[in-house]
Amino acid sequence: MTDLQSARGLNRRDFLRYSGLLGAAATITASVAACGGPSSTGAGAGGDKNTIQAALSYALSGGFDPMTASSAVAVAANLHVLEPLVDLDPVSRAPYNALAKESPSKVDDTTYRVTLRDGATFHDGSPVTADDVVFSFERVLEEKNASLFAQFLPFLKEVKKVDGRTVEFTLKYAFALFGERLSVVRIVPKKLVQADQKKFDSLPVGSGPYRLTAANAGDGLSFAKFDAYNGPRPAKVAKMTWLLLTDPNARVTALQSDRVQAIEAVPYLNAGALAKKSDVRSVQSFGLLFLMFNCKVEPFDDVRVRQALHYAMDTENLIKTALLGNATAATSFLQAEHPDYVKASTVYGYDPAKAKKLLADAGVSNLKVELLTTDTDFVKDCAPLIKQSWDAIGVSTTLNVGQSGGQYANRVDTGKYQVMAAPGDPSVFGNDVDLLMRWFYVGTWPETRSYNSGTAEAKKVVSLLDEAARETDAAARKKLWGQAIDIVAEQAALYPIFHRKLVTAWDGKALAGFQPVATTGLSFLNVGRA
């Protein structure tokens, strides 16, 4: 728990002191020790030329079964280990045929058929069959399994086997995004999962270019090339090892010492120094810092209060000071680079006078707010500046900074909070507007987190998304999405403050074909050693 006093006049040095960045130098020695993962063989620039080593920024949390796995580590690993029928390129986000031999064949508006790639096999040598595909989809759709991916398949009525290598999908209604949405279900071997689901969850067997050979919190993840893989993204090295280094200084040191060839989540303050030796790139992402209100608690049930706290934030200063420019202030639910971006009718520019007036119009004075945040590095850095902005308009603000899982389990999901600032990025699951908006505005979030699902506006958003899902004309669909975006922007029950830029660093002299991605994690599909 962190409770900072009034931060009026918080300058750059005060900010660094509050966020702990001035102490970074003192942690370097410990960070070097923290790099002692499973890499005794070494795979730096002068090491094993048939091995890739990398460092991810998240700890191992939960298992890998793609029916339920949503942790950053599991999603990144499964990208290399398991295949869907159609996948999304991790860099361009364009769909491509993975286990599917060719693009889904449209029988009619609500019927599609998909044939499996010739000779596709799982890592245990067994062939990938239509039975495995049907099983993989049915277990996601089965309500008792509580798969979070079911929410992305509201259009799907039935999946059935046509023959040993062909599957037919029956839709409830025409859905223009059917092909790319197949990417949310990764195909698993029915026989192995049914035999021992817990074993599969801890070390999954897929059909992807790499086999996951070991995974634990201390040593990280180890992969080996799957020699029998015959798909479009073959492994180009024999082995991979991923260190799981939550300490940002440890990741930086690992790259600087040639311990690894790539790291994600480069600390913004270290990007310049790393660029002197390594390739460093900042990529605009959908990933956002959002502000979420408990709409069942006064006065946050009043839209004017929610809007006031948005207008009170000096977001440009927040981005400049806490993220060193590595974000873009939200002008929509979507980042401006998204192919379906539309500017929202409500854009929260910095306007403290308007914020004060909105509070006055709502009859609110002497407001005291506890701002709940996660302990993610960049969020911790933003928190004191949000407090500074709110204190400046007379809103007495205290900060409660804690581990993400605990904050949600103990405060958010129990309704015992007022306002939360936290990161989010469902774009790891897909990049279309329907998927991104359903994540935040249908089901779990409005029902048990922002607690506004019963409002007319929230119901209208769901209705617009449902209507857009049935719309076959792209322009008409985008218009409906735009109307939904206008509502969530105006209501501000849960809405982005900014969209982050993700900084990745890698050794371009050691890796061939590597490109940073606009989502959490790293991709080594089609990447080899130089």
Image (cartoon, rainbow, N blue to C red):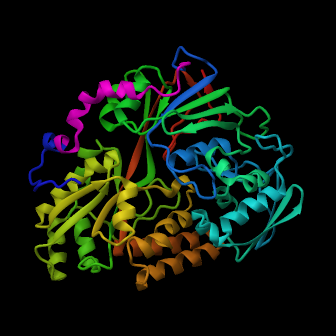
Magenta part of the chain: 16-42
**Quadrant location of the N terminus?**
bottom left
Up-down: is 430 above or below 82?
A: below
State the residue at coordinates (77%, 31%).
Answer: 227
- Left or right: residue 455 compared with residue 526: left
Percent from the top left, x then y, of residue 271? 35, 32
> In terms of secondary structure, what is the magenta stretch mainly?
helix
Q: Please identify the residue farthest to the top as the structure is shown.
A: 46
Q: Nearer the viewer, residue 169 or 276?
A: 169
State the residue at coordinates (56%, 47%).
Answer: 74
Q: Nearer the viewer, residue 175 or 72?
A: 72
**Residue 197 is inside the magenta segment:** no
- Left or right: residue 515 compared with residue 78: left
In this rendering, does residue 331 appear at all? no
Percent from the top left, x then y, of residue 104? 78, 59
State the residue at coordinates (55%, 57%).
Answer: 431
Percent from the top left, x then y, of residue 19? 22, 44
Percent from the top left, x then y, of residue 509? 52, 20
Up-down: is 143 above or below 163?
A: below
Q: What is the tally of numbered marks visible in this picture?
A: 0
Q: Nearer the viewer, residue 71 or 414?
A: 414
